[in-house]
Amino acid sequence: MFVRDCMTPEPITVRPESDPRAGLMLIKSGRFRHLPVVDGEGHLAGIVDRNDLEMFLSQAGSPGIQKRQHRVDQAMTREVVTVSPDCPLEEAASLMVVHKIDCLPVLEGGRVVGIVTETDLFKQFAAVLGGGSDSLRLTVQVADTPGQLAELAGRIAGVGGNISSVVAYPAGQAGRLNITLRVERATHETILGAIDDLPQFQVIHAWGGGCE
């Protein structure tokens, strides 16, 4: 899955010389938080958010006293972490965590073609795992050794279950792995019946698909 799959394409932008008040009005009316700042050729010059603009305007003197107009580039962040549309989504999420930011402008050919936010990532994560749907989500703990996922998937397929997504993560114990699967076309009773005779598979949780 890539950034292009969940980014907001062609986001609203402002120019460096734009009025900060106009930028704040755009953010409020559009109900978003960030504005990429681009130059006359569409290249990224910085990024500004609602807090940046509100803080700047609360502290800035009157343009009349200063004899000049305030500009967005007085409030924007100039050093911006960016991604390409073909960046894997998990790498984009990692960049947000490492840099402690909540959005990434998306650049292609040096131009802004989109923006991806932490909300976009949350929505995609929920969709992948079936949040809000009635499909079965099954978390099984297995040994962290080759072939475990293949055997588990084979058992599920053998009773007509279709695995539509898989997420694996450390179980918190050395040598153990948790695997969360989203399974369609089979009830949780059928799936559990297919794997409960295998001692190497420990069912941690089952949700949806008729699970009470």
Image: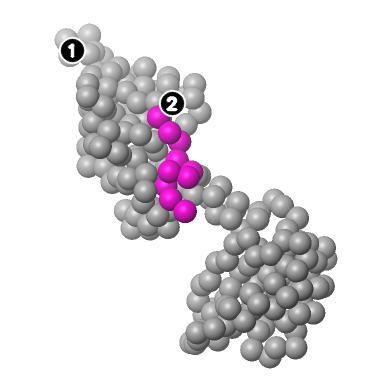
Are the two marked residues, 1 and 2, in contact with CB atoms closer than 8 angstroms?
no
Q: Taking the image as drawn, is residue 31 in sight?
A: yes
Q: Residue at x 70, y 72 (%)?
A: 157
Label number found at residue 131? none
- Nearest to the observer: residue 83 or residue 150: 150
Farthest left residue? 67
Inspect the image, locate mark 2, and give the three-letter code of the amino acid beneath it: Ile
Image position, residue 204 (x, y; %)? 67, 76
- Where 106 sits versus 206, above or below? above
Identify the residue position indicated by label 2 in the image: 27
In the rendered view of the protein, which quadrant contains the C terminus? Answer: bottom right
Inspect the image, locate mark 1, and give the three-letter code of the amino acid beneath it: Arg
- Nearest to the observer: residue 56 or residue 178: 178
What's the CA distance linking mark 1 and mark 2? Answer: 24 Å
Image position, residue 186 (x, y; %)? 78, 66
Image position, residue 27 (x, y; %)? 43, 26
Identify the residue position indicated by label 1 in the image: 68
Task: Report the span colored magenta.
Answer: 1-10
- Label whose residue precedes the other's in the sequence (1 or 2): 2
Q: Residue at x 18, y 12 (%)?
A: 68
